Amino acid sequence: MSLSSMDAAKTAVVTGASAGIGAATARALATAGFHVILGARRLERLREVASPLGERATVLSLDVTDPGSVAAFVARVPERLQLLVNNAGGAHGLDRIESAKEEDWEWMWQTNVMGTLRLTRALLPALKASGDGHVINLGSIAGFETYAGGAGYTGVKHAVRAFTRTLRLELLGEPVRVTEIAPGLAETEFSLVRFAGDEERAKSVYRGLDPLTPGDIADCVVWAATRPSHVNIDEIVVRPRDQATATMVHRKP
């Protein structure tokens, strides 16, 4: 299916779609009847996600930290777009403020905040033109809480929450809904990236509990996106049963 022949299906853009929540969201939206445009840096991984979806998926290179990449990506998106899922993001490190690495903070701001701004700003005209647009931002419970060692990541997720709430105000009266989905512990590549590939440390984050899965979060995205167009789900906070706050977790012996 070409990008110019999608009149029969709603179109959704999913960033960070090469793995984890982004990949699960792309699959779930395709199953729900959307044509999905998958964006990420790892094209081979994107193609693996898109392959089972056939003509329901389009793969495009996207680095949300690079304005030129964002511009090239947006140029390939149809003039009428119904859904943007800003999923690209992540954390680097767990350093206390006194030893914080500026390069880690800069990466987190570029990926989580500036990337969300770039895609949203660029695609709002297409979302408005559809007459029934929707922006869904993937936040985190880190946007509601803070914890020692987490200032960099909680800072950017607080910013994503403020961004989302402000966008909701600014689009009041426009045909565009705005939602934030804020997961707790979900087992993805998140911790592996945060801890620079240290697999044992990453696994320890989820040890002894039943974490959320990428599919659990994708279910939330699809549910919010498929409500009647007059229904705006402002935010969904979703944690595993074994987690009460960012730092209060029940682990089995």
Image (spheres, rainbow, N blue to C red):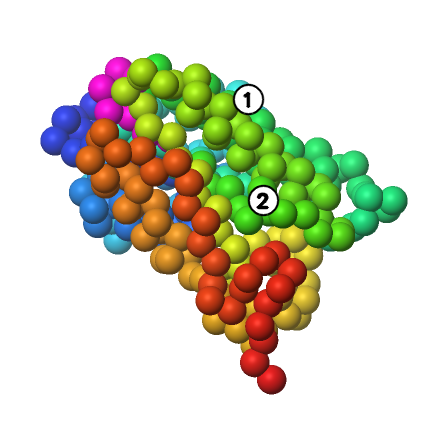
The residue beneath circle 1 is: 67
* Earlier sequence position, callout 2 versus callout 1: 1
* Residue at screen point 21% across, 49% down: 31
Mark 2 is surrounded, within 10 Å at the Cα level, by few (under 14), some (14 to 19) or many (20 or more) other residues, namely: some
Instruction: Name the amino acid, label 2.
Output: Phe
Mark 1 is surrounded, within 10 Å at the Cα level, by few (under 14), some (14 to 19) or many (20 or more) other residues, namely: some
Q: Quadrant of the C terminus?
A: bottom right
Task: Give x and y (percent) for residue 27.
Answer: 30, 50
* Residue at screen point 68% across, 47% down: 146
Task: Give x and y (percent) for residue 162.
Answer: 55, 30
Magenta stretch containing residue 134, yes or no? yes
Residue 18 visible here: no
- Judge whether 14 appears above or below 127 on screen: below
Mark 1 element type:
helix
* Residue at screen point 55% across, 49% down: 141
Residue 156 visible here: yes
Q: Farthest left residue?
A: 8
- Judge whether 81 appears above or below 22 on screen: above
Please name whichever residue, 175 or 196, is drawn nearer the observer in this view of the structure.
175
- Judge whether 52 appears above or below 72 on screen: below
Q: Nearer the viewer, mark 2 or mark 1?
A: 2
Instruction: Name the amino acid, label 1.
Output: Pro
- Judge whether 90 appears above or below 135 on screen: below
Q: What are the residue bounds of the magenta stretch?
A: 128-135
Mark 2 element type:
loop
